[in-house]
Image (spheres, grey):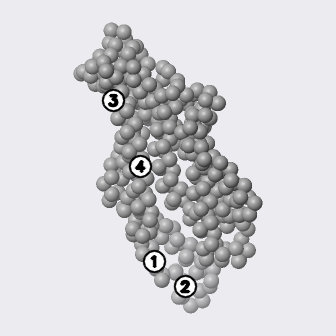
């Protein structure tokens, strides 16, 4: 029986005289990619129909474009100083104004998008690279392995995410690369717990039991049958984790543990702007607004993905 949103096609040659079981399997193999493509297209349609998620996608796309084309878009060198233009208000020459040593704020905001996006994406990739294998191993193997991984995860979760990231960044030393490592390691326990929980649910399904019954190895079952079915919740969590990583990178840069001057970072720009908030508020408004809009966009996309991937909303 065909399920909703699945392309159901008759098996080629299945009803023909002399058709073999191998013919039926080949026909099923031909239909499977079509069904997968149809399901993906349906999820994408449900996602773009949500105005909030569509807005988030547009903002994220613009932020990526700014980061990639920063040298072409920025009107000035982000680290070039001009002591004749110190703390000038927004004008036709400097749309976002200038900072305490005459650097163009717009150019620094544009180049600062690179640090925030890079920190967000790389940190989450680090978390996925560590957390998914550990959670998959704990959930599928069970026993003492599960107990050991779970206790380590609980110990890490007992420490607040940002506090752990600050401690690791201070230990590793102030730099953007060390900040990304610190954020990635600090966010790993969330992915371990999520992967373990979804693995426990999936491995009890009938198709996993059938794969085990026909003699598939545990490694093959975990990688070919369990892992693909836990990707949707991991994708949603990864999107939300990028938003948290952007805030964490800004916080570390604000404390002097992230991107180091004179290279621009939204967090370090806020750190400098706090000393001039009365005389030059534009120094704080634009980087702060950039962080707010980018984090909001990732959260909106994450919520949209969660709703679009939920079969109950089909």
User: Residue 267 location, x and y as percent?
Assistant: 45, 30
Reading the image, the residue beneath label 3 is 285
Image quarter of the C terminus? bottom left
Closer to viewer: mark 2 or mark 4: 4
Which badge, 2 or 3, comes first in the chain's sequence? 2
- Within 10 angstroms of label 1, few (less than 14), some, or many (20 or more) residues? few
Rendered image quadrant of residue 169: top right
Mark in front: 1 vs 2: 1
Residue at (51, 67) in percent of width and height:
33
Q: Which mark is residue 14?
A: 2
Label placed on residue 144: none
Residue in the image at 37% along x and 33% along y: 288
Q: Residue at x 59, y 86 (%)?
A: 19
Give the residue furthest to the left: 92
- The residue identified by callout 1 is 3
Numbered badge on residue 299? 4
Q: Secondary structure at mark 2?
A: loop
Q: CA distance from mark 4 to mark 3?
A: 21 Å
């Amino acid at each position: 029986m065909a399920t909703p949103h699945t392309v159901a096609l008759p098996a080629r040659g299945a009803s023909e005289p002399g058709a073999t079981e191998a013919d039926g399997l080949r026909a099923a193999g031909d239909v499977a990619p079509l069904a997968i493509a149809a399901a993906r297209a349906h999820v994408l349609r449900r996602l773009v129909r949500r105005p909030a998620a569509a807005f988030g996608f547009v903002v994220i796309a613009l932020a990526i474009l700014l980061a990639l084309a920063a040298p072409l878009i920025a009107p000035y060198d982000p680290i070039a100083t001009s002591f004749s233009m110190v703390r000038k208000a927004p004008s036709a020459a400097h749309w976002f104004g200038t900072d305490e040593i005459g650097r163009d704020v717009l150019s620094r905001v544009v180049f600062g998008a690179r640090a925030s996006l890079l920190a967000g994406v790389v940190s989450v990739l680090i978390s996925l690279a560590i957390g998914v294998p550990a959670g998959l191993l704990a959930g599928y193997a069970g026993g003492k392995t599960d107990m050991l991984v779970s206790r380590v995860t609980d110990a890490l979760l007992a420490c607040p995410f940002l506090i752990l990231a600050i401690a690791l960044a201070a230990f590793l030393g102030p730099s953007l690369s060390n900040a990304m490592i610190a954020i990635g390691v600090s966010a790993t326990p969330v992915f371990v717990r999520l992967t373990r929980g979804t693995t426990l649910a999936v491995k009890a399904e009938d198709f996993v039991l059938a794969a085990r019954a026909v003699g598939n190895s545990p490694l093959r079952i975990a990688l070919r049958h369990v892992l693909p079915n836990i990707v949707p919740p991991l994708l949603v969590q990864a999107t939300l984790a990028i938003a948290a990583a952007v805030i964490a990178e800004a916080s570390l840069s604000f404390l002097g543990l992230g991107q180091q001057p004179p290279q621009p970072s939204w967090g370090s720009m806020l750190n400098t702007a706090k000393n001039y908030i009365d005389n030059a508020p534009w120094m704080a408004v634009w980087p702060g607004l950039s962080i707010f809009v980018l984090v909001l966009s990732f959260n909106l996309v994450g919520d949209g993905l969660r709703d679009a991937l939920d079969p109950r909303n089909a």
